[in-house]
């Protein structure tokens, strides 16, 4: 019937013709009219007239200009508005500081010799010999002792030269002795009359002795400084090799114990008791008597503010009668005792007097050593970087703690305060304090340098972190002050610069706005960009691809035409 | 009663309060008395007062002094060190801090404890006098203070920013003795957080400030479970310098907690807190009702006659006394008529006060202390005996509510009722409103109930500081009077502004809390007293907080906007781009579209399959085999 009608498949392609053949074979009344219809449609299809060259060119221009707008305007605007502000940091220099390449810490210590009883010539020779002996002994170039002869005419002028770390007074006596003056940085050395070297002699036992004395006096300082340098990444060639592991360990203990340097420390004295008594104490008088002298001595390096409090019904974290070593760490009842650090930036050192008859058991070896007394006990312990607890046992009904009862706790606190501030343990007090200021400047210098290094590494590692200009500012200030500190190490000026450098470096590192948008997940970006960019990009890309295809086709046709022409 | 007291100011105050059952409290709270008591460095007292409807008001008061010289030398004994440091660091001369919860039901409970001087609006409220040369410095110090206190009290006080801070002009006066009270370097700042929920984490630091730490003395009763379960509670901290006429100035810290406990609720065991109706035979019926029969019962206010003891209500007895407290002040007082029987634990000494309505107890420091109040004897079947002290009528009742509808505009109406038959009440009404409530000041008006027309002459003085968007809230202080035995409506209108997307809190649909209005009633005796605060603080009260609904957007809006605009742009761009780059040809000249080609192909294939199926439907198996062979 209808389907069997002969079909003209002149214009149809190969596939179509096979389809229509299949269609002719079919007996279905549904499929045949459809296939015949398509055949009819395709039969009328014509080739469009060839496009004008100007049209093609215009289309190419349209596509190119769209792409140019996207690439030259859209991309820069997007880049500009979404980019993260990163100030320029002198990364290379910062890393140099951190690696210790920028500064070679040198502590030139001037030591003046007063030898009023020696003739000028002999004194000069003695000085030369002693310096020689010192140089032979010293293996650490960073820490150098320089001797100089102070003019005998004005011995009292010593105070005018603040750089002098120590004065040696050579006094004639019966035997060779050395004593450190407990109140002034003076080393008295007596010598028998024959011990002084003549003006020409090449060696002298006195010179060797003086050199040895000096070395032992400064041995601890040298060890601490070299430990500080070695624990920071200072190149090995500046470092002395003489540090034994045991010495390093004890120094490590000491440095972890001491507080971080701050210009002001806040001292809090607290009286805790687990019951209602005692409720008052003579702490003001006790501080005046026992602690104030030491605070006055420390005042060139640190300022101190003091407050005191009494807290009743404060039960400790551990109730045992005898506290073992493990109990000490949980003795402080942090949840209930009001030991909040002071506000205002200064670190707080806590000194706690706990009224109670608890004692601390010392380790067993010590107990065996201390004769047959059995278990030895102690009253106080130091909590690294935090403070001290002193267990004070008083009669049960004491309502008021007197100055006398506070003497022992306060003396303990004083000595613990010195070790908490990092003061060396040997030598006379003035020497220890001047050493402390040198150690602190070295420490601050190294700290600031390592903070700079961390900041540089952070900036390198996190590409998406923003670096505000205040950070760059802080870094440049730090570097300026570090340089100045490095030049004036060992002097008061050096400590000041190191202090500023450290504060600036910390401020730059802990800049708040740096971490504001640290985490902005990529999914969010996709969710925001895709709805716009997807639909816009598809016509753009497709238009370009089509045009490329058409262009290639035209090229090929042109080539074929050229070939045909050649053939012709 | 009326003991001889030094200042004439106090006498004038007393003349006002002498008949009040709250007299003992009122005296204790006045600065003049704290001067006379300043010798003793620490003092604590609990005053229990049964209220109508079977509730109990418990007022805890702790007060300690430190001499100013000891404070400046940082020697802290009774004064808490943590707070002392903050005060010094922020240059604070006087500080008042309030944590409150619930509503004081003035209609049934009467006048407020301490004459309202020790309470705040719901949430957290604080005001302080700071020492600063300029306003900017004062703001800086205020910021330091709020941040430090926020850490100390575990409250969101650090959210008291410039939009929540005002500088009241008329409503507050310093309580302490300042040498230069009116000097220009004293700045009063007031901040309020109505949304803050006061809870146990605020009580713990509060107790830590006490010398006895809640381990001995009356503070041992305080427990978060009971305190925050009460119908109304307020915790107050007041720090002020007090200078007695003879002797050294002291810095005084007064901590007080007032709570109204529902006796019925408190007596429920904690493990079985769900209230259940009593069985029928235990029910007490009001037999005077006409419909009373064997099967109908109108229950009497049976709970009012309940017996109670301290350990039933607070869960524990008082653990002795704090040994530091002033021995001349009795630690526990109870305000019930003398006719009522009160049992106390062994060793306690009962002292009846001459006013016939209160008695105090002294007890040894080591023993636990317990009070038991048996149910009052019922006489003639109904309770006629006075078993609770009659509540004092407050000077003013106030309630505030929103008026209007819709999300664009609204109004605030405060109903102020003066219950006194012959005394006019003069007071200062203070509102500190958030900036997004823009008030129309010209609409503020007063109207006396029952009288036609406005009565704007009642408003005597208005201090208004308009809001600045996102920078400052509205401050409105109105001095006005309410005539005797009348009710005044104070109304004003406001407009709600639309917030920015990021300014909405996570629970934006809940609404925004509007801080309580502070009403400070001025003393009528204008000439009396020692001048400084002679006009001040006869009584103060706070309205409840309000919940303001702002137009709240759909919070998925930004993404919707992105999608919508992107679609629009993509459509426009796609169309335009296609018009520009496509070539237009006649329909039969163009290439067949990809879709049509595909459809045709599919149809042809389908037709082929169908045809095949038709042909080989009969010998299906054979066709299969044939197919395989193919």
Image (cartoon, rainbow, N blue to C red):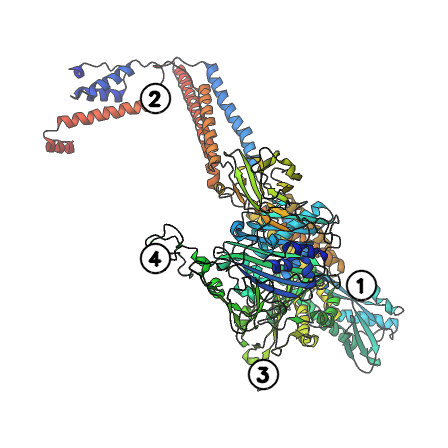
Q: Nearer the viewer, mark 3 or mark 4?
A: 4
Callout 4 touching callout 1 (CB < 8 Å)? no
At 61% from the left and 57% from the top, the residue drawn is B19
The chain that hosts pointer 2 is: B
Q: Nearer the viewer, mark 1 or mark 3?
A: 3
Q: Residues within 10 Å of mark 3 (few under 14, many from 20)?
A: few
Rounded to the nearest whole Å, what is the CA distance between mark 1 and mark 3? Answer: 46 Å
Q: Secondary structure at mark 2?
A: loop
Label of residue B280 in the image: 4
The chain that hosts pointer 4 is: B
Q: Is residue B281 left or right of residue B486?
A: left
Of callouts 1 and 3, which one flags the residue occurring earlier in the amino acid sequence?
1
Q: Which residue is mark 2?
A: B593
Rounded to the nearest whole Å, what is the CA distance between mark 4 and mark 2? Answer: 88 Å
The front one of A116 and B186 is B186
Callout 3 touching callout 4 (CB < 8 Å)? no
The front one of B499 and A204 is B499
Q: Secondary structure at mark 1?
A: loop
Q: Secondary structure at mark 4?
A: helix
The front one of A218 and A337 is A337
Q: Is residue A460 left or right of residue B460?
A: left
Q: Which residue is mark 1?
A: A162
Q: Nearer the viewer, mark 4 or mark 1?
A: 4
Q: Which residue is mark 3?
A: A369
Q: Residues within 10 Å of mark 4 (few under 14, many from 20)?
A: few
């Amino acid at each position: 019937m209808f389907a069997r009608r002969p079909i003209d498949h002149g214009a149809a392609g190969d596939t179509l013709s096979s389809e229509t053949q299949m269609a002719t074979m079919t007996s279905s009344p549904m499929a045949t009219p459809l296939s015949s219809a398509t055949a009819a449609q395709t039969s009328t299809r014509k080739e469009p007239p060839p496009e004008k060259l100007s049209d093609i060119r215009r289309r190419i221009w349209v596509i190119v200009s769209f792409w140019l707008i996207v690439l030259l305007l859209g991309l820069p605007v997007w880049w500009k508005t979404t980019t993260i502000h990163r100030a320029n940091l002198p990364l290379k220099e910062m890393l140099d500081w951190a690696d210790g390449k920028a500064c070679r810490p040198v502590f030139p210590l001037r030591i003046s010799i007063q030898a009023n009883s020696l003739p000028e010539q002999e004194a000069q020779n003695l000085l030369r010999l002693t310096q020689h002996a010192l140089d032979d002994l010293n293996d650490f170039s960073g820490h150098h002792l320089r001797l100089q002869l102070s003019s005998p005419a004005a011995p009292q002028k010593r105070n005018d030269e603040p750089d002098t770390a120590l004065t040696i007074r050579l006094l004639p006596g019966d035997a060779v002795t050395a004593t450190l003056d407990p109140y002034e940085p003076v080393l008295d050395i007596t010598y028998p009359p024959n011990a002084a070297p003549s003006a020409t002699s090449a060696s002298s036992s006195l010179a060797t002795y003086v050199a040895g004395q000096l070395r032992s006096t400064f041995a601890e300082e040298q060890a601490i400084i070299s430990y500080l340098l070695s624990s920071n990444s200072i190149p090995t060639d500046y470092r002395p090799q003489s540090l034994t592991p045991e010495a390093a360990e004890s120094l490590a203990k000491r440095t972890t114990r001491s507080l971080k340097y701050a210009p002001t420390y806040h001292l809090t004295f607290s009286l805790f008791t687990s019951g209602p008594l005692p409720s008052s104490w003579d702490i003001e008088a006790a501080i005046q008597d026992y602690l104030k002298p030491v605070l006055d001595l420390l005042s060139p390096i640190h300022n101190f503010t003091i407050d005191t409090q009494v807290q009743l019904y404060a039960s400790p974290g551990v109730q045992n009668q005898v506290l073992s070593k493990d109990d000490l760490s949980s003795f402080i009842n942090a949840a209930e005792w009001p030991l909040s650090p002071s506000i205002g930036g200064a670190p707080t050192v806590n000194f706690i007097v706990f009224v109670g008859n608890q004692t601390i058991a010392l380790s067993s070896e010590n107990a065996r050593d201390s004769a047959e007394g059995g278990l030895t006990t102690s009253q106080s312990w130091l909590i690294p970087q935090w403070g001290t607890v002193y267990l004070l046992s008083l009669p049960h009904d004491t309502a008021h703690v007197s100055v006398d009862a506070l003497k022992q706790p306060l003396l303990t606190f004083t000595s613990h305060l010195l070790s908490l501030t990092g003061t060396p343990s040997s030598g006379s007090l003035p020497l220890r304090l001047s050493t402390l200021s040198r150690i602190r400047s070295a420490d601050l210098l190294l700290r600031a340098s390592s903070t700079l290094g961390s900041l540089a590494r952070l900036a390198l590692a996190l590409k998406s972190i923003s670096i505000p200009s205040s950070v760059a500012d802080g870094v440049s200030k730090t570097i300026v002050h570090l340089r100045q500190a490095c030049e004036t190490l060992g002097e008061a000026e050096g400590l000041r610069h190191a202090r500023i450098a450290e504060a600036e470096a910390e401020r730059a590192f802990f800049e708040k706005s740096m971490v504001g948008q640290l985490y902005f997940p990529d999914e969010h970006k996709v969710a925001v960009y895709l709805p716009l960019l997807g639909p816009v990009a598809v016509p753009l890309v497709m238009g370009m691809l089509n045009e490329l295809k058409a262009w290639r086709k035209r090229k090929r046709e042109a080539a074929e035409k050229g070939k045909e022409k050649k053939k012709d | 009663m009326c003991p001889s007291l030094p200042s004439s100011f106090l006498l004038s105050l007393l003349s006002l309060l002498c008949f009040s059952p709250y007299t003992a409290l009122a005296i204790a709270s006045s600065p003049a008395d704290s001067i006379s008591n300043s010798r003793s460095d620490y003092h604590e007292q609990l005053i229990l007062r049964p209220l109508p409807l079977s509730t109990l008001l418990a007022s805890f008061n702790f007060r300690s002094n430190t001499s100013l010289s000891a404070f400046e030398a940082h020697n802290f004994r009774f004064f808490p060190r943590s707070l002392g440091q903050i005060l010094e660091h922020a240059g604070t001369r006087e500080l008042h801090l309030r944590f409150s919860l619930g509503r004081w039901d003035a209609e049934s409970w009467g006048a407020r404890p301490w004459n309202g001087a020790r309470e705040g609006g719901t949430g957290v409220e604080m005001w302080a006098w700071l020492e600063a040369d300029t306003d900017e410095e004062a703001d800086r110090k205020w910021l330091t203070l709020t941040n430090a206190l926020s850490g100390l009290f575990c409250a969101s006080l650090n959210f008291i920013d410039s939009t929540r801070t005002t500088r009241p002009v008329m409503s507050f006066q310093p309580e302490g003795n300042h040498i230069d009270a009116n000097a220009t370097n004293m700045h009063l700042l007031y901040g309020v957080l109505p949304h803050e929920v006061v809870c146990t984490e605020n009580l713990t630091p509060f107790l830590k400030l006490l010398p006895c730490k809640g381990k001995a003395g009356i503070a041992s009763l305080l427990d978060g479970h009971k305190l925050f379960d009460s119908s109304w509670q307020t915790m107050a901290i007041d720090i002020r310098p007090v200078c007695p006429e003879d002797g050294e100035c002291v810095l005084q810290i007064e901590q007080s907690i007032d709570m109204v406990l529902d006796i019925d609720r408190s007596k429920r065991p904690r493990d079985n807190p769900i209230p259940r109706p009593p069985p029928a035979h235990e029910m007490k019926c009001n037999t005077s009702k006409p419909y009373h029969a064997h099967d109908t019962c109108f229950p009497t206010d049976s709970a009012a006659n309940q017996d109670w003891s301290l350990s039933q209500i607070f869960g524990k007895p008082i653990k002795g006394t704090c040994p530091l407290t002033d021995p001349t002040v009795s630690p526990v007082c109870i305000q019930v008529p003398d006719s009522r029987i009160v049992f106390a634990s062994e060793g306690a000494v009962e002292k009846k006060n001459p006013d016939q309505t209160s008695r105090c107890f002294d007890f040894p420091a080591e023993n636990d202390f317990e009070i038991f109040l048996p149910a009052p004897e019922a006489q003639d079947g109904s309770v006629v005996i006075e078993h609770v002290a009659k509540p004092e009528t407050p000077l003013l009742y106030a309630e505030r509510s929103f008026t209007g509808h819709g999300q664009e505009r609204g109004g605030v109406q405060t109903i102020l009722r003066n219950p006194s038959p012959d005394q006019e009440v003069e007071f200062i009404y203070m509102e500190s409103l958030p900036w997004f409530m823009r008030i129309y000041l010209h609409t503020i008006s007063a109207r006396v109930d029952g009288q036609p027309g406005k009565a704007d002459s009642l408003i005597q003085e208005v201090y208004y500081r308009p809001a600045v968007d996102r920078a400052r809230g509205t401050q409105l202080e109105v001095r006005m009077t309410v005539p005797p035995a009348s009710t005044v409506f104070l109304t004003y209108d406001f407009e709600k502004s639309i917030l920015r997307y990021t300014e909405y809190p996570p629970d934006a649909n809940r609404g925004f809390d509007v801080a309580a209005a502070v009403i400070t009633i001025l003393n009528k005796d204008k000439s009396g007293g020692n001048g400084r605060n002679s006009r001040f603080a006869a009584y103060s009260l706070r309205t409840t907080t309000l919940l303001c609904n702002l137009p709240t957007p759909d919070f998925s809006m930004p993404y919707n906007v992105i999608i919508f605009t992107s679609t629009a742009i993509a459509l426009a761009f796609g169309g335009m781009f296609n018009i520009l780059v496509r070539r237009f040809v006649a329909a039969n000249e163009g290439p067949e579209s990809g879709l049509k080609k595909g459809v045709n192909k599919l149809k042809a294939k389908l037709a082929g399959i169908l045809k095949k199926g038709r042909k080989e439907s009969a010998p299906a198996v054979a066709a299969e085999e044939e197919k395989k062979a193919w």
